[in-house]
Image (tube, rainbow, N blue to C red):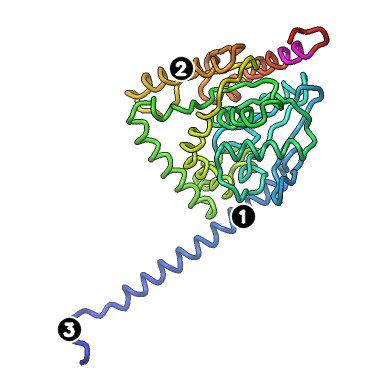
Amino acid sequence: MSAITNPHAPHRPWLRIIVRCLLLLTIFLAIVGFLFENISETREQRFNPAPGRRVDIGGYNLHIDCTGQGSPVVVLDAGLGDSYISWRKVQPGIAKVTEVCSYDRAGLGFSDSSPHPRTSGVFAEELHTLLHNAGIAGPVILVGHSMGGYDVRLFASLYRNEVAGMVLVDASHPEQQKRFPPALNDLDATWIREEEFLEFATPFGIPRLLGFCGHDVEVRAAECNFHSAREGVTELKAAPESAAQAATTGSLGDMPLVVLSHDPGTPQPDLPDDLVKPTNDAWQQMQTELAKLSTRGTQVIAKNSGHYIQLDRPDVVIEGIRSVVEQVRASSAPGSQP
């Protein structure tokens, strides 16, 4: 049976032409954006190469940058989706006191991607292998910012004899999702969608064109790339599992511990006004609890600082780390009490 056609239907070849032209234009712009992004990434990394070295940890390489001399070695672990460069205001100050290493978790900065799940338990194991393969002798002092707090707590739980002290820099708490206002969980879904958009858009150079990568060429070289955007989304989605893993870690005993917390008067800027106080009150209570993980734990409020204390008040972070270094050295000195 032949198809029935309407002899009065308008013939619109121009509509198909417009659709095809728009499709071709979209493909053309995508190709141009892809080339622009790859050329920009290559150029930036060529003129701003990674300091330090890349170390094989089992078929893929992690980037680590160690400066200074002495022991114990301080190891800096950045927050969710952040590269080693988040510590650049702190590392030079610590290098005057002892050896200090910052690094990129797999998939971030100048490190290769990992075939393993992106949870804090895996991060701790990868960091342990990295330090061993890089020839960095322990016990070390671990410094964790934000979600990096989960990583260093799990490292200490897995390799207790290889950790001499710890500094938590406005570190995440395993129960924060339960104890924050419920409305904040709705915002979490929005933040995930925003990060997913950046993951999709980065290969085509859109964040770079919109100025999201900023003007600091060192930061762009380390963080404005597709694999970092993808890793950031993966870490964000795995955060509840990382929190559950961190919740299984126990007391730190009498380990030297300093907890640095942001100024209550400088809360996270992207929170709605009605969520600022309850969120900040819950955060400060959880920070106080983190300081009680050790019988030698102390808490310091970093005045005039937001969540990134290492950027807003690097002097406070340097002093906190120096304090732990001095405690560890004093306890290991000849004649010191066990």
Q: Residue 305 in the image: state x and y as whole percent.
A: 53, 19
Q: Is residue 189 above or below residue 285?
A: below
Q: Which mark is residue 6?
A: 3
How many C-alpha atoms fall within 10 Å of the one at disc 1: few (<14), some, or many (≥20)? some
What kind of residue is marked 2?
Gln
Q: Is residue 90 left or right of residue 273?
A: right
Residue located 67% across and 30% down the image: 159
Indicate which disc residue 38 carries: 1
Residue at image mark 2 = 284
Q: Amino acid at mark 1?
A: Asn
Picture quadrant of residue 158:
top right
Q: Does residue 175 sit above or below 202 in this rendering?
A: above
Numbered disc 1: secondary structure: helix
Q: Check residue 25 for magenta coloring.
A: no
Question: Label 3 crowding class (10 Å Cα cut-off): few <14, some 14-19, many 20+?
Answer: few
Cα–Cα gap, marks 1 and 3: 51 Å
User: In the image, which residues are magenta?
Assistant: 326-332
- Of helix, strand and loop, which one carries label 3? loop
Q: Tell me which label, 1 or 3, sits earlier in the chain.
A: 3
**Viewer-nearest residue: 316 or 170:** 170
Which amino acid type is shown beneath numbered disc 3? Asn
Which residue is at 21% across, 79% downward?
A: 10
